[in-house]
Each structure stands twice: as structure tokens, then as C-alpha cells.
Image: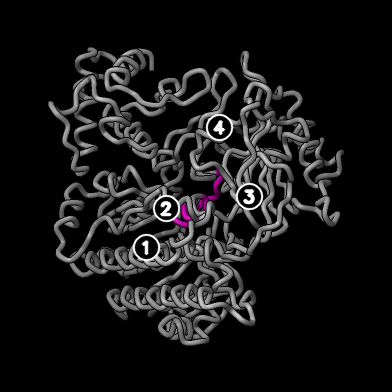
Amino acid sequence: MNYDKALMIGLDGATFALLKPLMGNGVMPFLRRFMQEGVHGDLLSTRNPLTPPAWISMITGRSPHVHGIYDFLRPATLEDGSVFLKVNDSRYIRSETIWSIAQRNGRRATSLNFYGMSPPPPIDGYLISGFVPWKHLRHAMHPTGLFDTIKQMPDFDYKNLAMDIGEEKKCVQGLLEGEHEDWIKLQSDRDTAWTQICCRLMESDRTDLTAVVLDGPDKIQHLFWRFVDPVLQPPDPDPWFTRIRDLCLGFYRQLDANIERLAGEAGPDTDVILTSDHGFGATTEVVYINEWLARHGYLRWRDSAEHGETGKLTADHMKEHLGMVDWRNSVAYCPTPSSNAIYIKRASGSSPGVKESEYLTFCLKLRQQLLDYRDPANGEPVFVGVDANKLEGTPYVEPSPDITLRLRDGGFVSILKSTDIVVPRKHPDGTHRPNGIFIARGPRIRRGAEIKALNLLDIAPLLLHLLGIPVPGDLEGRVPVEALDERLLGQKSIKRGNATVAAAAADNDRQPTPEQREALLRQLRLLGYME
Amino acid sequence: MTSTATLSKADVESRVIAVLNDMTADWDLEINGGIGPNVRLMRDLFFESIDVVQLVVSLEQNLNCKGIPFERLFMRDGDYVEDLQVSEIVEFLHAQIGTH
């Protein structure tokens, strides 16, 4: 049977704050035309606008507290009270993906370079996980044999699909002198390699849904934000600044060409959707959260812990950071910069921590101290958002952060030891923002319109609707009808279907009983935290 | 599939070695005598931390057993171990799968 087809191109970290000027000044002419011929608007990200929770939410239509992916890593407390970090993978995703929903409804899918898809689930179609080093690409692909096919492709180096974790860390750790030009080329080469593979698969065996992520924009913007953000351009740039800016603009020219090639290969009968997992903006300071926790009596550094290098957010190796903390005498900690989270250790057996009966008081006190904290330099609040996730009275999947932080400059925290809590950066760098992008064009898409912001939870319902699949009743988003061609709306009503099928098994859910929930809400109201 | 709870130590060793051979097939390694119980991950197979992560996933898949507490193997007295020998992994897994 010939079903409707859809192509989703994910642009990691893409933001209209940058793309609109690039479209306006001729760097991205195809994207400009594409947007004019379709519909566009902001796409709101997850509470912590970060790659793992955001992309997984987009492809499951469920929030992080349901699918269970909050960060790249997941902390686990050992019997002796020390903390160990595990790497998230596809087995920890608790919600069904759109690839699986499509398969249950007789459609085939291709999923390329999405975070967290390894080990690869066996879908009817093709899947290559993103964020995989070259040494492990063979085991990150489905079906068996796809790796050898790609490896034997002429004029194609499969290693260009890989992500080198050592290079990846430089996004937050910074580059050494002389590395900048190669770094920009690396990102462009990888995006182009994924484009080539995607086009090759569309050409040889087209599936109903094709989805690919190009992650170069995120990497470029982390390190080169001041070179590309129009509002940060110096009036009299030196030759090196001009050279780096030109290379960055070259990256976006190639990105425009890659998008054009993908949309062209998909053809005029395909609805093409461009999304990003989060937006981008400037970060101007470094906030040392574990140092803050240490000074407020929640965390104790080991005597051997040394101060972090200026501007760094984490140690070069995670085990070095874990070795800096005296875990037996710490009750709250931030495990990774990307989490922007505080985990509260619960008392368990001989392991020190906060007792269940004291959790509410402990958490609220910590939250208030964070909100009350002021930058010694100017008296302004530093933590502008402090969400106590487990006090919202809703079910959640562990390991949920107890507190999610939002910094005043939108940046990520540093987890290192420091002499100061807040340290200005020498230059602004790039960091994530909640507003990503949504652009769509195709036979069933409205033409020439800007719409109000969508939520990334709306993307899964939209894709399923475009494929003619009933939208499972438990998806949290909606089909954004304002993005569709209204002439076709009447011909194709939105169908709601049965709930999704549970994916990974529960580790240890924590769902408050109705009595606990009522008691919790009552206490929060009494304390003035809820209306 | 054979129940992993009844695997002998020799069975576990052959599975661990099979997983390592499969995992390193594209790495262009030259190991005299192939991968055996005395091979060390870092020294001989040039493992990096991300390779250890992949090994854990592959072993759990091979043994059809998720959530093996590998942290007990990788951490001693609160610190990460520097290197591991294949035989140490075999000993650990053999002790674990009977109780997991």
C-alpha cells in the first residue's frame, strides 16, 4: 500500500535568533525559501532544554518524568553512600518511540543519528544511533549487515558518522589554540556524512517515515556563539576573529546545502519538518553549584580535591570529579553540568542521607536558600528557577532530579571546586535556551505562515497524523492543526488511537499514593508554595 | 537460549571472550594468541571509558540480564580501578549471575 510520507530533519540546537539573520543575509538561501513556502514558529523544549530529554520527548511524545531520560548520565548511590554514574541508553527509555508506533501500524521508518538509540531497537526499516564512537558503530546499527554495507560504500568514510567523546567534551571544556578550524570542519563533515547516508537510504529503500538529526549547529554554537550571534559582533574585529567567523558562516552554507539535498531527495510529495531540540543564546558566567552546596553544608569536598581551572564546568574525566567528593558526608550534589540538577541522597541502610520523613522540609529549605542566594558582586539573584520536581504531586520515573535549576544567564553549572561561586567568563560562550525551531513545508502543510510556539511534545502527534496513523491517546501533545493546510483538514480528520506500548521495564518508580499526594499538596499550600 | 543462571565459569569465560572479539572486530588490534583470560582491557585492548560502557551493554545483552551491578567491579574503596583482566570480569559475572 502506498502511504503518505514524511521526512523530519532535526537540527540540534537550531535557533531563529541565528537562522533568521543567516537567511536574511544570503548564507542560507534554501532555508529562506523553504520557510517562505511553509509554516514556522518556535518550538518549546523540555524543562531542562538538553539533548537527551528533549530529543527523546520529541520522538516519544512523552515528558522526561514519563520516559525517564533526564541527562546523558544517570546517578546511582552505592551501599557505602558513594555515587556512581551510569550512561543512559535505549534500554532505559520507558516510552514507545514513533518508530515503534509506526511499525505497529504497518509503516516503516528510518531513524538516523538520534541520541540514545543504542543498542538499536529492531524496527521495520533502518536505525543508526547517534552519539556513538566509530569503534562501536557496528553495534549501533539495525538491521545486521547495514554496517558492512556502509563500510563498503565507495568514497565514504564511515568514521565520519561517529562522535568522538574526547572531541565532544570540548563543547563545554573549550578548545586549545590551533584547534578551532579543524573543529568546525569536523562538524560540517559529520553533518554531510549523515546527509549522504540519509539520501542513500531514501534512494535505495524509501520508508514511510525518515528522520535524521544533524548535530553540528549545537557544537558550533557552544564554542563559537560570539562569532555568529549578530548582537555580539565587535565593531573592529581582528583578522583571526574574521577568519573564524567566515569558517562558521561556511558551516551554515554547507548546512543549508545539506537541508536542500535532503528535501530534494524526499521529493515534492513528502511533508518535510525541521525541528530543533532547544534554542541557543549567550552564557556570560560560570556558577559553581557544588561549591555552593559545600558552603551551605550539603556537600563535603575531599581534602585532595583541587580547584577547577577557570571556566571549566567539569573535570576531564568524570571519575576525577566523583573522586573529589566525600560522599559519606554529603547529602546533596550535582552530578553533571548538563543536568543543571541537584540530587538529594536518601537515607538507606547504613548509607547516610535524608530520611523520608524529613525530605519535604529538607527540600523546601534547600530550594529557598537557592532562591535567596545573591551574587556578591551585584546583589542579584543567580538561580532564577528552582523546580522541586518531586513535590509536584505527579508520578515520576527515577532517577528524577530532586531540583532542576535555571541560571540567570541560561547557562549550565560547573560541578568543580572553586574559590568563588559566580565567576564571569572572559568571553560569552553559547548555551541552550528553551525556544527551538519548527519549520514545515509540504503538500499537507500550510503555506507562508508564522504560528504561535508549539511544544516539542506536539511533533510525535504531528508526524503520526501525517503518516495517517491514529495518535495514541496517552501522548501528551496535540496535532498542531494550525500548521496544516486547512483545505485538507476536512478530508483527513485527526484520529486518536489506543495508548502506546510500554517500552523499558520499570527500575524503581516512585508514585505517591493519593493520601501522600493530598498531604503533600496540603503542606505546600500551608507553606505558601501553591495556590 | 540457555538459562544464564546455570552457566559454568568456563561458559561465562567463552561468552565474555566472544563478546570482546565481536566488539573489537573493527579495531585493527593484533593480540598474540587472541583474547584470553589474561588479557587486560586498558593495556592490551586500549580500552577507553566509553568502551567499558559498551562492554557492559554487550555483556548484559549476551547474558540477557539488565542491571548487573558492574559498579562493584569497576569501583574499589570508592575509587575506580585502573585496569581489569578478562579473568576478573569472568569471576565477577559468574558470581553475579547466580544471584541476579
Q: Which amino acid type is marked by label 1?
A: Leu
Circles 3 and 4 in contact, beta carbons < 8 Å: no
Element under disc 2: helix
Q: Earlier in the sequence, mark 2 or mark 1?
A: 2
Q: Label 4: how many residues lie within 10 Å, few (<14), some (14-19) or many (20+)?
A: many
Mark 3 lies on residue? A310
Viewer-side label of 2, 3: 3
Q: Which amino acid type is marked by label 3?
A: Thr
Per the model, the C-alpha gap separating discs 2 and 1 is 10 Å
Q: Is residue A301 left or right of residue A253?
A: right
Mark 2 lies on residue? A167
Circles 2 and 1 in contact, beta carbons < 8 Å: yes
Q: Residue B86 — which label? A: none
Residue A348 x, y percent position in the rendering: 62, 18
Q: Residue A186 — which label? A: 1
Q: Tag 4, which chain?
A: A
Q: Main secondary structure of the magenta part?
A: helix
Query: Is A459 covered by the magenta stretch?
Result: no
Residue B65 x, y percent position in the rendering: 34, 26
Q: Which residues are magenta?
A: A53-65
Mark 4 lies on residue? A322
Q: Are marks 2 and 3 on the same chain?
A: yes
Viewer-side label of 1, 3: 3
Element under disc 3: loop
Q: Is residue B90 left or right of residue A64?
A: left
Q: Label 1: how many residues lie within 10 Å, few (<14), some (14-19) or many (20+)?
A: some
Q: Which amino acid type is marked by label 2?
A: Glu
Residue A460 x, y percent position in the rendering: 45, 59
